[in-house]
Structure formats: C-alpha cells, structure tokens
Amino acid sequence: MRGTRVEFARRGLSADVGPYRLLASLGTGGMGRVSLARAPDGRLAALKQVHPALAHDPGFRERFRHEVLASRRVSGAYTPPVLDADPDAPEPWLASLYIAGPTLQEAVDAAGPLPEDVVRRLAVGLVTALADIHRAGLIHRDLKPSNVLLAADGPRVIDFGIARASEGDSELTRSGAIIGSPGYLSPEQAQGQRLTPASDVFSLGGLLVLAATGRAPFTGRSTPQTLYNVVHLEPDLAAVPPAIRYLAEPCLAKDPLRRPSPSQLLDAVGALAPSPRPWPDAVHALITGREKAASRALRGRRGKIAAAVVGAAAVVAGAVTVSVLLAQSTPQAAPPAEAPVPRPTTPPPPPPPPAPLSVAGLRHIDPCKVLAGLDVRNRMGFTGCAFVSGGQHEVSVGVPSVPIPAAEATETATVAGMPALVRAESDRVRDRCRATVALPDDPESALSVDVARDDAAGATAELCEDAKAKLGEAVLAITGGSARLPDENTTLGKVDACALLTDLEAQPIFGVLPTDRFSSTSHSCTWYVADSASVSVQLDYYDSPPNADETRGERITIGGMTAYQRSFTETEPDVCELRWLQHGTEGQPREVASIRVRPPAEGNPVDTCRQAREVADKVVPRLPR
C-alpha cells in the first residue's frame, strides 16, 4: 500500500479517512473530491471529501449534517446505501456503497438507444427509487443521466439528500437560483418555483425518452434555449416507441398536478419477468470493466482510475446535487444540527376537481337533480333524466349528450352567458324543441334540454323558450354544485371507463399494443387492438329489472362478482361479452358493467372469452363496490 499512500499524498489526499482506506482517486467536482475506498468490512465505497473552503463555512457544515441525516433515511433496492459519514471532521466526508456500473448516458453512448423491454425495466427501477426517496421526505431535484448508474442487477439512483455548493461559491443555495441540469429540469424548477415530488417525475420522463431514443426531449442549441423549451414547448417524442411514450408523455406534463405518481407508473408498466442480464451486452461489458478496475485497486495497484473505466463522472456528480425536504419552504431552511429530520406535516394537495361543465365534471352530476320542481319520470342511464312538467310536457336532460349541428340549428341564443344552439321540430303528433350548450373543453359534447308535447299543435316557439329557460337552470345547478352526486365513490357514474385498463395491460392480453382508444359516451371506452379487433368497457344504469337476454349465458365468478358470459356466434362470430351487476338488486335501479371483445377479421381464431376474462380481472378491482 506504500505506493498508494505516496500517490494520495502527491495528490493532497490522506491515505485514510476515518476507518476507510483510500485506494484510488475517482475525480473531483465543485463540492469536493471522490475516492474509491475500502470499508472496514472489506466492501468498496465511494467516499466524498468536502473542499476545505466549504468546510470552513459554518452554514455549510450545518446543512451538510442535516442532509447526511436525511440521506440515511433513504433505503431501497435501487439506491446505494450510505455506509458512514462524519460531518464534523476537518474535511467532512460521506461514504456510500460503490456501484460498479456506467451512467445511463455512458450506456446509451456505448449501446445506442435501449430496447423497449430494457427501458421498461429501467423505468421500474427508477420509479421504485423515487418512491423510496419521496417516502423519506426528499425531492431529488437533479435526476439526470449521470445520476443513474446501471449495475449488473438493475439501475441505481445516486446523489440524493446531499446539499450542493454553487461552482466557485461557498454559499450553498440562494433564493431564486436555478439548480439542476437544464435538459431534465421540470418547468417549475426552471422558473425557480417551489417544488413537489412531481418535479422528479418530470425528470424521469426525460430519462425514459433519452434511454429509448438517445436524445433528451427538450434539447436546444444553448442552455437558455433548452430552458425555454422545457417551460414553453412540447417534448420531442416522435422517435419514442408507443409503449415507452405511454409512460413518458404523462410525466412530461407542464402542470405538476397532471403527472402520474410513482405508484401509478408502476401499475402502468406492469409485471416484468426476471432477467439475469437486464442490459444489452455492450453495457454489461462496461460493468465488467469497472469491476476489474476496482478489483485491481483493491489489490493495491496505485493510480487514478479513469472515469471511462469506473464511472467516476457519475460519482463526482454527487458533488453538485441538490435535494430538499418536502416540508421546507425554501432550500435555505434547515433545522438545528441535533434536530431529527422533519417529516411533512400535511399531505400534498389533491388534484383540482374537474370543471363542472366538462365530460369529467358531468360524471359527478346527478342528471335527475339539475331541474328542481319537476317530477322525475325515469332515469336515462348515467347521462340523462326524463321529467314531467305541466301535465303533458316532457323534459329530458342529457349530461353530456350530442350537440346540435350548427347547420341544423333553427336559432342561436345566449343561455346563462354561454352560446347555445336551438332546434325546433314539429309533426302531426308531436312538437319538440331542443337546446344545447357545447362543453368548453370538448365541443363534440354538450349539455342539452329537450322539451316535447303531444298536443302543442305547432307551438314550437313556446317550447323553445321553455327549453332555453330550463337549459339555463341546468347550467346554474351544475356550476353551482346543487346537482352533484354524494362525495362517496360508490357509483359507477363517476368512473371514467377509459381509466380502467391501460394500453400496457392490454398488450399481453392481445399480443399487441392497442393502436387507438375511443370513448363513444362518457361511460364507455373501446381499445382498438389490430385489424378490427377491439375490447370495449361499458358502464350502464337501468331502472327496470333485468330481462332474460341480459342474464343469458354461462355464469362465472370474477373478483367475487357473478358474471354472465356469452358468445354472439350467430350475429357476430366469436364476439364474447361479460356482463355483471355491480350495484343494486332485482326490481331496483341497477348499475351494470360489461366487457365485449371482438376478434380480428382475419387470422387464426382467438379465445375472445378468455381475453374478456383477463380484461375483467384488471377492471373489476378498480370499480367501486
């Protein structure tokens, strides 16, 4: 070890730091230097020593001590553990387990864009690491390709929980300073706003795009251009495979409240088969090279281990990482040195409720409550209600319904401050008038009121005035909140059918990723798989008891629910449907769910009933009981 001692002395390093024996220099960064070290138990460690100039700053020491305590709280399969630290040493230091693997950037440079299944495996590791970090009350704040190492058994997220000093400045952080890597900053971080864990989710989306394409989603010709792209432009996802785009695109939403949580992302990825070699061969070759280089250093070979061989660049990046406790209002806030790291006292705010006059908002509306003072004749599923008004007047409300085509309108009007279209119809038996206002977020959907009377004898003008008045009442009841369903989520009426099955969940069932998703009503969704094959989920509401046709077929049990399975071999060959009663009893209003699978028009026969049951296995647990 004499040669090693001489080498470290020549470089200004001690041969021992605490109980750790330094073996080789991995590099230097803005915060200090990092060395490969041997722990007392023989394990290899990445040991970081703080620059002396920073060590003389009392404020830095306090924050460094605070962050060391926070770092110890993060543990998981995809984060390297902190082995030891001494924030009170003349040169404060921290040792974490050494990871012999290239950075994500080095892996992509060596192997090119990673295959789809490899990126999904990478996503699971990164999402799990973020969940561990956020659970400990931290935000990473600098999730970038050089802070992700690819070990032989999976990825590792490094450099969390350690405060950073600005290059050439002993001040740890400054209010309003932008800290992080421009290509992977969240928009709120780029604008110096207060961060939430959703900021890390945005950065994760950028990493998945890089891994799948070899290019970051917001790269510009300069740092200011890149920051502008992050804040104002949509990501470049043209080359991202559909399955990866399905994961990455929601993460890159500008609004933090619209980004998925780590648990939602894990659900979207789904189960993965274990693999002894998770990376391409070129990446495993880099891992082997780093393992051999570290082994030589452990045997006493002196000298600096090149960053290209051991991934020093990634370790040194730890010198320029920022994390902040969720409970802190600014990065400068820190508790006294002896105080425990505080946990957040309040949960993150829930996402804002949907706008009342939107498709999502109307799922929270009871259509039979939008018109007061009228007798309810019958409920028309989840999206409508029929009333009786003034003897023979019939009033129907649709929430939502199909708007009146502009070319077919007989009148334009303003109803409750919104533009409305009116259409009058009359025949020998019945007069009718319909008034609609298009939903602001979806002009293809509308709120409508129909007024009809059998003996009106051409009095459509009177009916249209009534229709416009009642449409105004309906708008005010919906926007004012008086027509909302109870807060308890016990009805299928609030459920978005398109949220019950992800594209990635459908892929293994049908052997291919769905090509499109379409919602023909607010309570149905159809996934088009390939060559006319499709799977549809429909949520219905009936006032009447079930008829014989609805209960025909084989009785099976799915998720504790009795379902009827039948094939339409006569009218639609090989189409299979599952239908079950979700709420209600015979003779009472009933909420019914159904799944229908249609096979491809050509090709080998498929067991559509098996596919329908597999879809039901995903859907049933997500429905309110």
Image (spheres, helix red, strand yellow):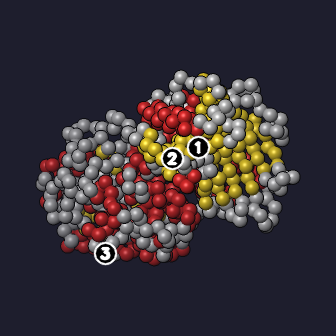
Q: Residue at x 70, y 57 (%)?
A: 534
Q: Is residue 457 left or right of residue 30?
A: right
Local crowd size for mark 1, using a 10 Å CA cut-off: few (<14), some (14–19), many (≥20): many
Q: Is residue 109 in sight in this rendering?
A: yes
The amino acid marked with disc number 3 is: Arg
Q: Residue at x 51, y 47 (%)?
A: 411
Which x, y percent locates residue 165? Answer: 20, 58
Local crowd size for mark 2, using a 10 Å CA cut-off: few (<14), some (14–19), many (≥20): few
Instruction: Determine whether label 1 and label 2 are within 8 Å by CB.
Output: yes
208 and 154: which is toward the camera: 208
Q: Is residue 437 left or right of residue 401?
A: left
The secondary structure type at the circle numbered 2 is strand
Which x, y percent locates residue 256? Answer: 38, 50
Residue holding disc 1: 424
Residue holding disc 3: 221
Residue 388 vertical position relative to residue 178 in the rendered view, above or below:
above
The amino acid marked with disc number 2 is: Glu
Q: Is residue 286 in sight in this rendering?
A: no
229 and 71: which is toward the camera: 229
The secondary structure type at the circle numbered 1 is strand
What count of labels does the image hold?
Answer: 3
Q: Residue at x 83, y 35 (%)?
A: 548
Residue holding disc 2: 411
